Amino acid sequence: MVAVCDAESGHYLGSKQIEEGSVLNWTPDGKNLVVTAMETDSVVFIPVDFSTTDSVLVGGVKGNPWKNQKVLEILDDCFEALSEMLDPGTVEKFKNTEEKDAASFGWPGLGMALRNTWGLNENTPLFRYFHRNGVTD
């Protein structure tokens, strides 16, 4: 998911679902977002129109894309979220992965995505939960 916000007000100007594992850049003229998919090396341009009252990202949606997102607070929340993202076999394989191998499971894609989207390097409820239970890295 990519979202564009007004830097002064913080209001969301639009969002659009993109492929996971993508790198984003602006074109020099600021009229497009360039999305490069890491797995396929494909490049897509998303036109940006700041003159509209709809989503500034052409083909996107207006508003906060994360407003209804559940905040992860405990380990069970993590497995519930993983079950929505991955097939049951992959979730079960991860549950049975030895601790020493867990950090590299699906690396870099899955591990990095979970760390970043679940706020595991920030002071989030999930971060605090893990630290209270002795999981610090």
Image (spheres, rainbow, N blue to C red):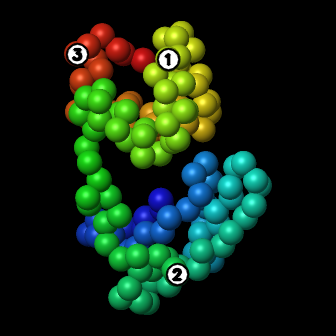
What SS does tag 3 mark? helix
Q: Nearer the viewer, residue 20 or 116?
A: 20
Local crowd at mark 3 within 10 Å, few (<14), some, or many (≥20)?
Answer: few
What SS does tag 1 mark? loop
Q: Quadrant of residue 9?
A: bottom left
What SS does tag 2 mark? loop
Front of the two marks 2 and 1: 1
Identified by mark 1, the residue type is: Asn
In the rendered structure, which disc, 1 or 3, sits on the residue that comes first in sequence?
A: 1
Residue at image location 72% in from the left, 48% down from the top? 39
In the rendered structure, which disc, 3 or 2, sits on the residue that comes first in sequence?
A: 2
Q: Which residue is mark 2?
A: 58
- Counting from the top left corner in percent of width and height, residue 31 is at 58, 79
Question: Is residue 112 visible to the viewer in this orientation of the structure?
Answer: no
Q: CA distance from mark 3 to mark 2?
A: 44 Å
Side of 52 where 9 appears, left or right: left
Q: Taking 134 as reference, is 16 above or below it?
A: below
Q: Which residue is mark 3?
A: 132
Identified by mark 3, the residue type is: Arg
Identified by mark 2, the residue type is: Val
Residue at image location 68% in from the left, 69% down from the top? 44
Q: Which residue is mark 1?
A: 96
Q: Taking 102 as reference, is 37 above or below it?
A: below
